[in-house]
Image (spheres, rainbow, N blue to C red):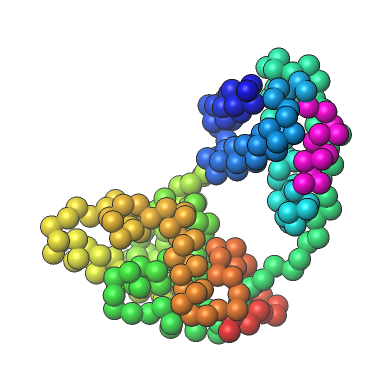
Amino acid sequence: MDFDIHIQQFMTYMKQEKKTAENTILSYERDLIKLKKFFQQQNIEKLDMVTITNLNSYLLYLEKQKLAPSTISRNIASIKSFYQFLVHTGGINKDVSEELRAPKVERKPSQYLRKQEMDWLFEQIHSQQLKAMRDEAILRLMYDTGIRVSELSGLKTEDVNLTMGYIVCRDVKEKVLPIHNETIQALQEYIVEYQKCQSEKEKEVSEYLFSNQNGGKLTRQGIWKMLKSYETKLHLKVELTPDLIHHSYVVNQGSLGYLSLQ
């Protein structure tokens, strides 16, 4: 089936030529593999057999799965990018995806927590255990600076200046973010305890600021899982996500309302 070959070529193009972020590439690949499986069920084996009717049938299939409009819009973006690539490389003669239209996305107010709610969360996580010290330092850093998960995951110990009170992010472009006393203290306690534990175990200290339990770099997925574990453990009524923490950071600079945590 030529779908597999073209999808793989598209992924290579996105990575090597377009320098697209890895997470975006993975999303595109998932979307296109799902599209391929749908066409297989329709006995459509070649790309040049696909019509706009087939594509609209696929969107209807996604809607029947009760996917969010934003998810369907992302699928459409994946399909359109794929077809543009196919036309450009001569894989097909006509871009039948041009007529696809994204559903209207209902914009909901961003959720966020007020300062008192965040302080309560810090108190629940606080512990003298290394993992809890790490998690509190991560959460405080996210809330104090608005740092994104991808930036946080890539932070190295050398990027932190506790004496002057700032961190340096080097994800896409370098930027300096100030940190305040509570965050400085949480980071200091975590770093000292982490280095002590590694010394006692006679293990090498990671160059990255935050490590997982196996000693490796804490990934974006690891941070998401950590937040989800506290959401379950503390029986929260909201989804504890990086976006929630980021919106809380933004809102608490002003005087807007809040979303109750409990």
Instruction: Give percent across and percent down for residue 58.
Output: 77, 41
Q: Is residue 51 visible?
A: yes
- Residue range (magenta): 50-61
Quadrant containing the C terminus in the rendered view: bottom right
Quadrant of res 259: bottom right
In screen coordinates, is 104 left or right of 234? right
Quadrant containing the N terminus in the rendered view: top right
In screen coordinates, is 225 left or right of 255? left
Please tell me which residue is depicted at 33% across the width and 69% down the height of the picture.
131
Instruction: Give percent across and percent down for residue 154.
Output: 42, 50
Determine whether 3 is above or below 216 in the image. above
- Tell whether position 211 is magenta: no
Determine whether 192 is above or below 50 in the image. below
Instruction: Give percent across and percent down for residue 187.
Output: 35, 68
User: What kind of secondary structure does the magenta stretch mostly adopt?
Assistant: helix
Q: Is residue 88 visible?
A: no
Instruction: Give percent across and percent down for residue 120.
Output: 49, 84
Determine whether 163 is above or below 68 in the image. below
Quadrant of res 135: bottom left
| Viewer-closest of 17 and 33 | 33
| Viewer-closest of 164 and 2 | 2
- Tell whether position 52 is magenta: yes
Please tell me which residue is depicted at 34% across the width and 72% down the height of the picture.
133
Please tell me which residue is depicted at 17% across the width and 55% down the height of the picture.
203
